[in-house]
Image (cartoon, rainbow, N blue to C red):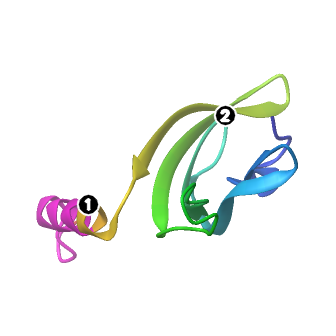
Amino acid sequence: MFKTIDDITYDRKEDEDLVRKQLEKEVLTKGAWATIVFKYQEIDQKTDDFGAEKAAIVRYRKRNGQYTQQRAFAITNAVQAKKIVKILSNWFPEDGE
């Protein structure tokens, strides 16, 4: 749990070893419900190195002064990310309001 949005990180440790590292973070919404997009990498079990870059869209709920994760959607590769961008760009063109 996290007290502020600035405290929220997508890093994850297992037995003191970093197995997921946050590369970037963009806050989409703030308030009682926060939405954050993370760019991250996870340890590849075969090579013991960090693998390909991924993204996740994560929703947090603030309750009793603490943010807790409620939902997450992982974008696991560049092909999937580009398809999502293409779809959203078609639905919401830049010249439209």
Q: Nearer the viewer, residue 6 or 9?
A: 9
Query: What amino acid is found at the position of numbered circle 1 in the picture?
Result: Gln
Q: Is residue 1 left or right of residue 25?
A: right
Point out which mark residue 80 bears.
Answer: 1
Query: Where on the picture, by quarter, is residue 67?
Result: top right
SS of the residue at dot 1? helix
Which residue sits at x=17%, y=68%?
86
| First reached walking from the N terminus: tag 1 or tag 2 | 2
Residue 68 picture location, percent across and down:
71, 31
Query: What amino acid is found at the position of numbered circle 2 in the picture?
Result: Ala
Instruction: Write the start and end of the magenta stretch as one range.
Output: 82-96
The reply to whether the magenta stretch includes residue 88 is yes
Which residue sits at x=63%, y=48%?
30
User: Do the numbered discs 1 and 2 sit on residues whose CB atoms are within 8 Å?
Assistant: no
Residue 26 picture location, percent across and down:
58, 65
SS of the residue at dot 2? loop
Q: Which residue is mark 2?
A: 32
Which residue sits at x=66%, y=63%?
22
Q: Residue furthest bottom?
A: 95
Query: Where on the picture, by quarter, is residue 32?
Result: top right
Quadrant containing the N terminus is: top right
Residue 89 picture location, percent across and down:
19, 68
Q: Residue furthest left?
A: 90
Above or below 50: residue 12:
above
The reply to whether the magenta stretch includes residue 61 is no
